Amino acid sequence: MNEQEQHTHLLQFFRWVIPIIFLFNLAFVAMYMLTFHFQFIWNSLVSFISGCALLLAKALLIRGRFFQAVIVTFAILLLLALVGTVALPQLTAVNSLLPFIAAIIAVQYLHGRILPILLVICWVTIMVLQLVAIVVPIQTILSPMFQLGALLSSYATVIGVLLLLLWQMSTRSNSIVEQLRAANSQLHAAQGELENQITARTSDLQQALQDLRQRADAQTQLLEQVEEQRVIIRELSVPVIPVNRQTLVMPLIGSFDTQRLQDVQEEALNAIERTGAQQLIIDITGVPVVDSYVAQGILMVVQSTRLLGAETVLVGIRPEVAQAIVGLGITLPGLRTASSLQDVLASLPARVE
């Protein structure tokens, strides 16, 4: 129950109880006029003061002081129970219901540490009422018909107020149940929507994962193709042509870097090992520039092939390349050279024999 609903229910309680208390005040005045017994004046005064106190509690409630209004109402109900029992012990059973009404009000509108204290006060009040009923003698000041009427009217009033509180509690419980049902429905709807979103998101993620796998497969295939093409390009850039069983020709074209020089060395060694050739002719006619880096690479090829028992012949050295080699101070020790590939090939039959 929210604060507005609590305010409305307590205000409704005041609208019921305050007129009833003032009606009892008038009834006590009327009984005094019939019997001239001082107890009715006492009860009339107490009921009047209680009604005024409840009016004060109502004013506090209207001004927004909810807690103070509940405490004043609680105290007035207990005071009515005690004073009514002392004045009219015949109504002890009825007055014993007032602490129960006070307890219901406390449970309905208060919470925290003060609630157990108020419930203990209600329990003590009920015990005191029973003790007072035993100690105070019952005096018959009314005729049996008046006593029966007073008892029935008191029971009817107190039980009516008690039923009003129970009805308010039932309304509150039904309101809470409806709120819980609405919240549960919203929760189920939100859960269903969340499940749909999760399902859709999962489907999207699975589709994205499948797309990534397809892309990864395509990239793998592309890399394999690139690698195959690279191998083909390397083989084409470093061709090894067998002239006969003992002679291989490796024509070189273009510029060289570290990778290509390494490919030249690997391809030359693999070809010699594979064919068992005794002579490797390296034609550098198509190499535009031979610097110290390229010369060192060629020397490494010569030394490597010599370890495999093959002789290396360098052909195709153009005049400008020769001048550059001399100008750089590059020496090619132990390397056989020839002016052209034709000169070397012309001498092959004699060397083969």
Image (tube, rainbow, N blue to C red):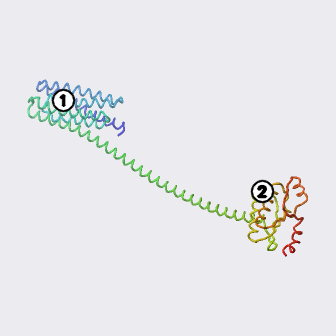
- Does residue 267 appear left or right of residue 18 in this picture? right
Percent of width and height locating residue 139: 9, 29
Q: Residues within 10 Å of mark 1 (few under 14, many from 20)?
A: many
188 versus 218 height, above or below? above
Residue nearer the viewer, 125 or 46:
125
99 versus 237 height, above or below? above
Residue nearer the viewer, 44 or 114:
114
Q: Quadrant of the N terminus?
A: top left
- Does residue 306 appear left or right of residue 134 in this picture? right
- Does residue 80 appear left or right of residue 258 in this picture? left
- Does residue 34 appear left or right of residue 311 in this picture? left
Percent of width and height locating residue 245: 79, 74
Residue indicated by mark 1 = 82
Residue nearer the viewer, 172 or 121:
121
Residue indicated by mark 2 = 257
Residue sitting at x 80%, y 59%? 299
Residue nearer the viewer, 273 or 208:
273
Percent of width and height locating residue 275: 76, 72
Q: Quadrant of the C terminus?
A: bottom right
The amino acid beneath tag 1 is Leu
The amino acid beneath tag 2 is Asp
Q: Earlier in the sequence, mark 2 or mark 1?
A: 1
Residue that extends furthest to the bottom in the rendered view of this protein: 353
Q: How many marks?
A: 2
Residue 72's disc is none
Mark 2 or 1: in front is: 2
Residue sitting at x 82%, y 63%? 252
Q: Residues within 10 Å of mark 2 (few under 14, many from 20)?
A: few
Kindly state the secondary structure of the residue where label 2 is placed: loop
332 versus 271 height, above or below? above
